[in-house]
Image (spheres, grey):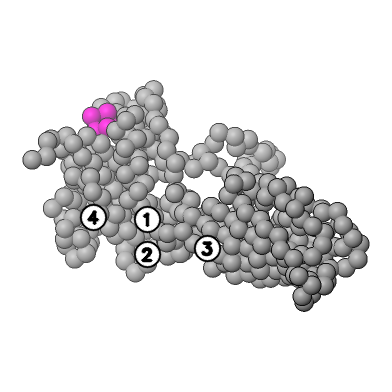
């Protein structure tokens, strides 16, 4: 028999009016991959091993809709799920959900139903951290440049060092969360439960968030979240890239972002860096994002003489936006001259820097053409690259 107070309780907040989405239907009931958005979170709860009880907090008028969804799609979850009416403010809704959970759990997770891509692994990770530290939230470091527009129209760059975006689920020891909601704090100034803890001077631990765990707020967010959910497998992916450039007299040879001394150079619309072009195609291929020619046409004037590192950075940003990161690179360079042995280590270091990899995750091999075809006759350079990418939260 399970002892009282051991397990996870989850409050799913789905009682908002969704004014920024437009339309009459609250966003959590909009279709998401063929089912109401809130069903994505309910499916995670249905499979969450430690779940003892959950509360789905909805508008009172949405109760029948919620009851029908649970009865039809989640019959196993029904015995552990309480459907609760929301309050005037978010804090009231969480308080109602907390009351419905009772005291049969030691950790409570509070999750916004407008984040449909939060997976079971993230729920479990936050719960474990909350059990250890008392409170925990998933965060992501900000990577975009931030600017603030002043009242006089000027823009000011805001330093992003140390800034993180907060996500849900947010986890808390049940008794601490209950005490926090009993405190006389201005609810209008509190946007989530972690902020409530911080306003009381209570520490909140940060854990790694998930780039796919986006919040649906505006109409365009729904399509973006669907793309992330539909295109994100649970396993690693592999991409293959190839490039070949004609060689012409006069060095140096641009390869891997490095100028290699010699008597030939690669002819190309950009800087002719066959290694970085192959790597770019491999990255794009790993996430089925097209090829380098689609993203950087060789007829575009802005790409003439362009540093191929720009292409690789662009592909890397797209891969990260789709929830992946590079894990390993293997490259074969086929070139008769100049010999690459003296600069192989420098190439590995540079490729690692561009992709955010340690040198030991980058393999570069050089092969000659043994006097055969354009490679062996010294008229061309070719590269093949294989890139393995892994889910960003792994």
Reading the image, the residue beneath label 1 is 116
Taking the spot 53% from the left edge, 52% from the top edge, the residue there is 327
* Of the image marks 2 and 3, the number of the one nearer the N terminus: 2
* Of the image marks 4 and 2, the number of the one nearer the N terminus: 2
Q: Is 194 one of the magenta-colored residues?
A: no
Mark 4 vs 1: CB contact within 8 A:
no
Residue 309 to residue 143: above or below: below
Q: Few, some or many C-alpha atoms within 10 Å of disc 1 (few <14, some 14-19, many ≥20)?
A: many
Tag nearer the camera, 2 or 3? 3
Mark 4 vs 2: CB contact within 8 A:
no
Reading the image, the residue beneath label 3 is 238
- Residue stretch in magenta: 173-177
* Residue 60, image x, y percentages: 22, 52
Residue 293, labelled with which disc? none
Residue 46, labelled with which disc? 4
Which residue is farthest right? Answer: 250
* Of the image marks 3 and 1, the number of the one nearer the N terminus: 1
Dominant secondary-structure state across the stretch colored magenta: helix
């Amino acid at each position: 028999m399970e002892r009282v107070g051991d397990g996870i309780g989850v409050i799913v907040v789905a009682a908002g009016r969704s004014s920024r989405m437009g339309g009459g239907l609250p966003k959590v009931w909009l279709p998401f991959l063929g089912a109401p958005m809130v069903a994505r979170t309910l499916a995670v709860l249905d499979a969450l091993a430690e779940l003892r009880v959950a509360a789905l907090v909805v508008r009172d008028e949405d109760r029948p809709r919620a009851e029908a969804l649970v009865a039809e799609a989640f019959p196993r979850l029904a015995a552990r799920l309480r459907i609760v009416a929301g309050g005037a403010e978010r804090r009231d809704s969480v308080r109602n959900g907390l009351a419905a959970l009772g005291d049969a759990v030691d950790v409570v997770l509070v999750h916004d139903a407008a984040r449909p891509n939060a997976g079971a692994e993230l729920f479990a990770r936050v719960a474990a951290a909350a059990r250890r530290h008392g409170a925990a939230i998933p965060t992501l470091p900000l990577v975009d440049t931030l600017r603030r527009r002043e009242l006089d129209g000027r823009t000011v760059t805001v330093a992003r060092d140390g800034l993180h975006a907060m996500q849900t689920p947010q986890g808390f020891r049940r008794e601490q969360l209950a005490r926090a909601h009993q405190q006389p704090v201005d609810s209008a100034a509190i946007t989530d439960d972690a902020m409530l803890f911080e306003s009381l001077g209570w520490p909140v631990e940060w854990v790694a968030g998930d780039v796919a765990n986006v919040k649906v707020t505006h109409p365009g967010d729904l399509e973006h979240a669907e793309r992330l959910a539909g295109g994100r497998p649970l396993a690693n992916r592999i991409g293959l890239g190839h490039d070949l450039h004609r060689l012409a007299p006069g060095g140096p040879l641009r390869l891997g972002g490095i100028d290699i001394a010699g008597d030939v150079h690669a002819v190309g619309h950009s800087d002719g860096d066959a290694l970085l072009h192959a790597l770019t195609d491999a990255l794009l291929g790993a996430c089925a994002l097209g090829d380098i020619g689609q993203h950087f046409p060789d007829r575009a004037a802005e790409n003439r003489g362009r540093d191929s590192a720009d292409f690789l950075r662009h592909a890397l940003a797209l891969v990260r936006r789709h929830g992946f990161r590079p894990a390993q690179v293997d490259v074969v360079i086929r070139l008769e001259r100049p010999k690459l042995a003296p600069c192989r280590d420098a190439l590995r270091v540079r490729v690692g820097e561009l992709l955010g990899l340690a040198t030991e995750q980058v393999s570069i091999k050089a092969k000659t053409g043994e006097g055969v075809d354009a490679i062996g006759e010294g008229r061309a350079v070719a590269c093949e690259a294989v890139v393995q990418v892994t889910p960003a939260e792994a």
